[in-house]
Image (cartoon, rainbow, N blue to C red):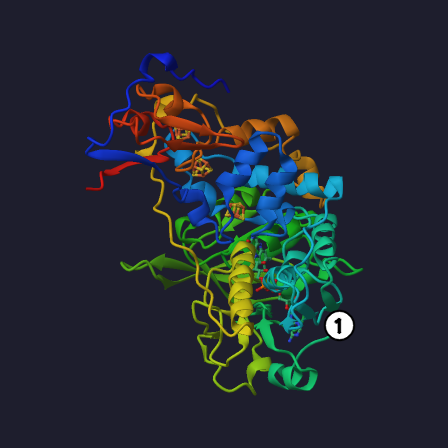
Amino acid sequence: MEKPFAITLDIESSLANKTGTWRVERPVYVDRMPPCNDACPAGENIQQWLYHAEEGAYRAAWETLVADNPMPAIMGRVCYHPCETACNRAQLDESVGINAVERFLGDHAIAQGWDLPPPAPATGRRVLVVGAGPAGLSVAYQLRRLGHAVTIREKASKPGGMMRFGIPKYRLPRDVVDAEIERLLALGIDLELGSAVSDVGAVMRADGYDASFLAVGAEISKRTYLPAGDSARVVDAVSLLRSMEGEQAPLLGRRVAVYGGGDTAMDAARTARRLGATDAVVVYRRTRDRMPAHDIEVEEALEEGVAMKWLSTVKSVGNDRLVIEKMQLDEAGFPQPTGELEELAADSLVLALGQESDLSLVDGSDGIVVADGVVQVGSDMMTGCPGIFAGGDMVPAERTVTTAIGHGKRAARNIDAWLRGGSYESGPRHELANFSGLNTWYYADAPKTVQPHLELARRVSTFDEVTGGLDESTALFEARRCLSCGNCFSCDNCFGVCPDNAVIKLEPGRNYAFDYDYCKGCGICAAECPCGAIVMVPERT
Ligand SMILES: Cc1cc2nc3c(=O)[nH]c(=O)nc-3n(C[C@H](O)[C@H](O)[C@H](O)COP(=O)(O)OP(=O)(O)OC[C@H]3O[C@@H](n4cnc5c(N)ncnc54)[C@H](O)[C@@H]3O)c2cc1C
Ligand code: SF4
Ligand code: SF4
Ligand code: SF4
């Protein structure tokens, strides 16, 4: 992408203009919070790693990225990228493909065999983490970096939580999961597999841990009572998807109905298609616009031939058919029964009605409050029991991998402060870099790059990955689409347009300063800065 030349005046022409302080306003360089960063649940410094990536400095980009999120190759595949929804570039043409560049960097790091930066010197403090899903792995990584000794106890035979036992392989290949988890554990994190914790307080006392972080997820499928014939085949979606990691693929039959409207329902239906179901039908009681599943999941399911039966509930399950009742939405948008029944041929029914947490491990811990099936935590992620923190799906929040990773980071900072007898103070919050603060004329049109997709025939017959990655040239192009909202990207415009040569370039790097002895406060630099990184403030009197 060509960038327009900045107009640079003859520097010699105004060197004698030392004017003193008769300004009413002075320009100041600022850093603002780009909306992408603000929207990322893991708090990634996206603008900064894109800046490194667009220079081809992939290692620096990756190291900036993993400071907040140690699993970018996973995130670059499964994150629903709220950063892109918030991205200012969406108002210009299309949002920057942040998620695709993140994946490129994650895959590149795996291919290059890069290691994570080494931990700080040992602090002598020991922390127990329960659960090796994204929340537990994230907190363990961040605590280890700070020099604490961390033990993760995981009841399953492999780490990863729902990244391994929920999200299907066609969206998240397991070699990627293994590579990013192994690299993180190599920092010296102790992982005990097949090691369920049934009473966290008892374990902490017995083994002398200084603090703990609970991340047991929400892996119990919600059930509903359905009259069912003796040989009706009814399974829950979590068990179905978990069994895909076993030796034996589950037998579902040719016609499979999936009951529910969330992402798990889409994954179950798409998995059924790949297991040989010719008819995979999602039965959902509301309409598409009210479905909790993300649009991309619904679209990909439809592409793969999954049928949707809206405004329908399952009344009973027979051996080879279901009885469905038609629903209608009332004025408040709630589905109400109509009494109208129909039959749907189905060899099996998969229940995907949401998940809940098994919180029995906190039964004996005083002060921990459970409400609506989740553990209550403060903004520091600590439960009501001092020293016991929690995050991920078992606390009230959006249930996504990225949120879990963000919880792990936030909890680690607070656990570290707590272990040191203090409290964590985040730095001052930068003002948001809104679209209105950008000079969009500066940026050339550049349509978003498109990630390749596996052809449909292979999608429905194999578990090969559906969405492909960007190659180096397209990843670079995509990174260069970033407008660097609210943060200087060294375009030299201010340096070039200042009529009084009051802008000084600081070498090396991308920093500039104002020489206020020369600046008249005309404000041209602020007006011409493409990304809103200069503000005019009233002159001090
Ligand atoms: C089918 C499916 C698809 C999904 N797809 C996406 C997606 O595409 N993108 C996205 O962002 N999110 C997705 N999610 C949601 C996401 O997977 C979860 O929000 C996330 O994994 C939660 O992380 P967690 O660490 O809290 O819990 P989990 O990932 O559930 O991990 C909890 C871990 O704790 C272990 N554990 C439980 N109890 C104990 C105990 N007592 N002792 C020791 N260990 C214990 C479990 O074995 C497990 O390993 C999906 C979820 C499902 C079910
Ligand atoms: S983790 Fe998700 S929200 Fe954060 S930068 Fe990556 S894609 Fe965006
Ligand atoms: S243009 Fe760049 S800095 Fe601005 S919101 Fe998008 S990704 Fe973030
Ligand atoms: S005009 Fe260019 S060099 Fe000057 S602050 Fe803005 S982005 Fe940085």
Q: Tell whether 183 sits left or right of 526.
A: right
Count of residue discs? 1
Q: Position of residue 70 (x, y in %)?
A: 63, 52
Q: Residues within 10 Å of mark 1 (few under 14, many from 20)?
A: few
The answer to whether residue 134 is visible is yes
Give residue 241's quadrant in the image.
bottom right
Name the residue rendered at 67%, 40% in the picture.
Answer: 459
Q: From the viewer's side, name the closer residue of 59 and 252.
A: 59
Q: Quadrant of residue 63?
A: top right
Q: Give the residue displayed 52% in from the left and 32% down from the top.
A: 509
**Above-or-below relation of 103 to 183:** above
Residue 76: tell me if it is visible: no
Q: Secondary structure at mark 1?
A: loop
Q: Is residue 87 above or below residue 125?
A: above
Q: Decide which of 322, 141 is in the foreground and name it.
A: 141
Whether 439 is drawn above or below 123: the answer is: above
Residue 388 image position (x, y, % from top left): 54, 77
Kindly identify the amino acid type of the residue bearing the numbered disc 1.
Gly
Looking at the picture, how far across and down is residue 513, in whole percent? 40, 33
Looking at mark 1, is its residue's CB closer than 8 Å to ligand 1? no
Counting from the top left corner in percent of width and height, residue 336 is at 35, 63
Residue at mark 1: 194
Ligand 4, seen in the image, is in the quarter at top left
Q: Nearer the viewer, residue 138 or 23?
A: 23
Q: Quadrant of the C terminus?
A: top left
